Image: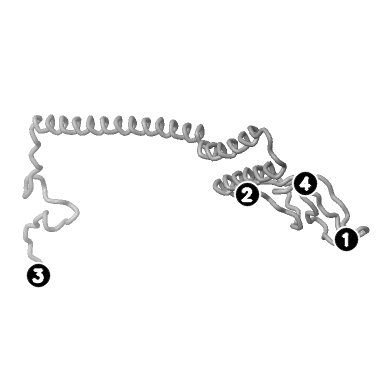
Amino acid sequence: MSTTEPIDPSTSNPENPSPAGADSAPPPLSPPEDWQAALAQATDALRAKEDECLRLRADMENLRKRTATELSQARKFALESFAGELLAVMDSLEAAQQVKEASLDSYRNGVELTARQLTSVFDKFHIQAIHPEGQRFDPNRHQAIASLEHDEIPAQNVISVMQKGFILHERVLRPALVTVSKGKPGSPS
C-alpha cells in the first residue's frame, strides 16, 4: 500500500513558505523621484506645523500680556464705583460745614441724612455692620475688650458693643469691640 510518489515541498510543510519566485514576487521599488517628492511634501507639512506652533505661541503670549494689563487695571480701579458713591456723602458733609447760622435741629437732620446716605452706599456694596449684642462671642468677628460677671447673661456671650464691626461679603473688615460675660459670680466659666 505504499506508493512512492514525489513529494511537493510547498504542500507538505506549512511552516516553510513557498520558495521565492514560485508564485509571488517582491513589490517593485518606487523610483527615487517619488521619494524626493514624498520628502518635499513631508518637509512642507512640517514647516506648516512649525508656523502654526509659532503663531499659537505668539497668541498665547499676547493673551497673557492682555490679561495682565486688564488685571492691573481692575486692581487699580476696583474702588472707583465705591469712591464715586462716597462723593455724595462728602458733598453733604461739606455743605454742613458751609452753613453759617444753623440750629441744633438742622445739624441733627443733616447728620441723619448723611448717615442714611452712607448706609445706602454700604448696602449697595454689601458692607454690613456686626451687631453682636446678646450673641455668643465669636473671636473671628469680635474682639473682647473686657469681660464682666453677669447674673442674667450666660458666659461667653456679648454684653455690650463699644465699637461696631463691619463685614464685606462675609469677610471681616473690622471686628466689633465688645464686652463679654463671664457668667454668674462664683460659677465656673
Marks 2 and 3 sit apart, C-alpha to C-alpha, by: 113 Å
Mark 4 residue element: strand
Chain-order first, disc 1 or disc 4: 1
- Numbered badge on residue 151: 1
Query: Which residue is the site of mark 2?
Result: 128
Q: Nearer the viewer, mark 3 or mark 4?
A: 4
Distance between mark 4 and mark 2 Cα atoms: 17 Å
Q: Secondary structure at mark 1?
A: loop
Which residue lies at the image location 76% right of the left edge and 49% below the top edge? Answer: 161
Image location (x, y in percent) of residue 28: 7, 39
Q: Is residue 74 left or right of residue 139?
A: left
Q: Residues within 10 Å of mark 2 (few under 14, many from 20)?
A: some
In the picture, the disc for residue 1 is 3
Mark 4 — residue? Answer: 162
- Please name whichever residue, 80 or 64, is drawn nearer the observer in this view of the structure: 80
Instruction: Please tell me which of labels 4 and 2 falls first in the chain.
Output: 2
User: Closer to the observer: label 1 or label 4?
Assistant: 4
3 and 4 marks in contact (CB < 8 Å): no
Percent across and percent down for residue 136 are 75, 57
Query: Three-letter amino acid code at disc 4?
Result: Met
- Which amino acid type is shown beneath numbered disc 1? Asp
Q: Residues within 10 Å of mark 1 (few under 14, many from 20)?
A: few
